[in-house]
Image (cartoon, helix red, strand yellow):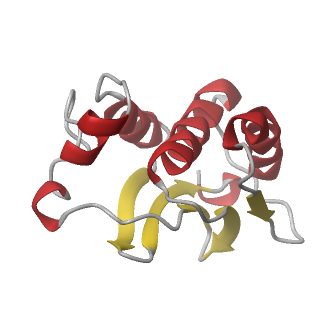
């Protein structure tokens, strides 16, 4: 149940969020996927840590839905967004945005590795939207019924 992965990640990262709230929005029904719980947790942790580090002062929203036989996990922040010139590069190995290089340490591997983990699970990781109102990353995975 992917909801268990979401809840465990939120519990792990709430202390890191400080005064910000990590809000979790889960469906009433089970969302079952076939995969490595640790690696899927790694993807969610990475997206949530990025939202904490770069997502401005607002809350972070982690949502899970079952959409047309796909498990769809979204991590939304309320930060400044990702510059248009950098959007095509953020999933490249070792790439870090200019804003990230100026404010936080890192290797530039998090989004690259997370996308690869999603692909190895038959899914994808995409930048769904970004702008001054925040950024949304989306992980889509096949559910057990479609695996």
Front residue (pair 119, 104): 104
Q: Is residue 25 left or right of residue 65?
A: right
x and y percentages locating residue 22 in the rendered image: 73, 55
Front-lying residue, 55 or 110: 55
The residue sitting at 54% across, 38% down in the picture is: 43
Picture layout, residue 129 above or below residue 115: below
In this picture, is 141 found above or below 4? below
Q: Is residue 106 above or below residue 11?
A: above
Viewer-side residue, 107 vs 18: 18
Quadrant of the image occupied by residue 142: bottom right
Measured as percent of width and height from the top left, residue 114 is found at 43, 37
Whether residue 115 sits left or right of residue 67 in the image: it is left
27 relative to 110, above or below: below
Q: Quadrant of residue 71?
A: bottom right
Total numbered circles: 0
Residue nearest the viewer, comparing 119 with 101: 101
x, y percent for residue 130: 35, 70
The residue that appears at 32% across and 27% down in the rendered structure is 109
Whole-percent x and y of residue 58?
A: 61, 65
Q: Residue at x 45, y 64 (%)?
A: 79
Q: Residue at x 30, y 40 (%)?
A: 100
Residue extending farthest to the right is: 28
């Amino acid at each position: 149940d992917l909801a268990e992965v979401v809840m465990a990640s939120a519990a792990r990262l709430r202390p890191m969020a400080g005064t910000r709230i990590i809000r979790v929005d889960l469906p009433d029904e089970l969302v079952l996927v076939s995969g490595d719980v640790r690696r899927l947790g790694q993807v969610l942790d990475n997206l949530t840590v990025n939202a904490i580090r770069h997502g401005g002062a607002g809350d972070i929203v982690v949502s899970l839905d079952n959409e047309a036989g796909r498990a769809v996990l979204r991590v939304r922040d309320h930060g400044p967004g990702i510059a248009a010139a950098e959007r095509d590069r953020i999933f490249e190995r070792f790439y870090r945005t200019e804003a990230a290089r100026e404010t936080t340490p890192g290797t530039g591997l998090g989004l690259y590795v997370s996308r690869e983990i999603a692909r190895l699970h038959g899914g994808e990781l995409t930048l769904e939207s970004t702008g001054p109102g925040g950024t949304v990353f989306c992980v889509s995975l096949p559910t057990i019924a479609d695996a």
